[in-house]
């Protein structure tokens, strides 16, 4: 886990530590309690992106508490 990053509880996007809202979905529900990390470059071609219901490129947490 990268301790200097916050993850959105709604869409699992990894955000900067100083973020107050998610850069993707604008949710203010951010947490430091997450595990696993995946970078999705081409969501339209990715089985993992399909499973995670991700449609935008970016870094995502696999498990968010």
Image (spheres, helix red, strand yellow):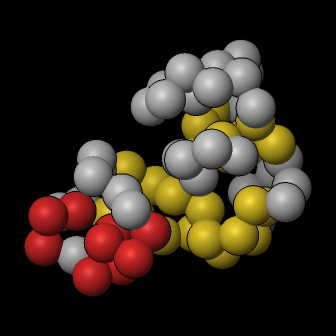
In the rendered image, residue 11, in percent from the top left (x then y), is placed at 54, 47
Rendered position, 11 above or below 49:
above
Rendered position, 2 above or below 32:
below
- Determine the residue positioned at 63% across, 44% down: 10
Q: Is residue 5 visible to the viewer in this orientation of the structure?
A: no
The extreme top residue here reads 20
| Camera-side residue of 62 and 16 | 62
Q: Is residue 32 visible to the viewer in this orientation of the structure?
A: yes
In the rendered image, residue 23, in percent from the top left (x then y), is placed at 49, 26
* Quadrant in the picture for the N terminus: bottom right
In the rendered image, residue 52, in percent from the top left (x then y), is placed at 44, 68
- Determine the residue positioned at 63% across, 26% down: 27
- Determine the residue positioned at 71% across, 23% down: 28
In the rendered image, residue 48, in percent from the top left (x then y), is placed at 36, 79
Rendered position, 20 above or below 13:
above
In screen coordinates, is 33 left or right of 53? Answer: right
The extreme bottom residue here reads 47
* Quadrant in the picture for the C terminus: bottom right
């Amino acid at each position: 886990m990268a301790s200097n990053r916050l993850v959105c509880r709604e869409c699992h996007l990894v955000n900067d530590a100083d973020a107050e809202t998610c850069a993707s979905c604008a949710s203010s529900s951010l947490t430091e309690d997450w595990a696993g990390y995946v970078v999705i470059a081409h969501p339209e071609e990715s089985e993992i992106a399909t499973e995670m219901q991700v449609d935008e490129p970016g870094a995502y947490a696999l498990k968010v508490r």
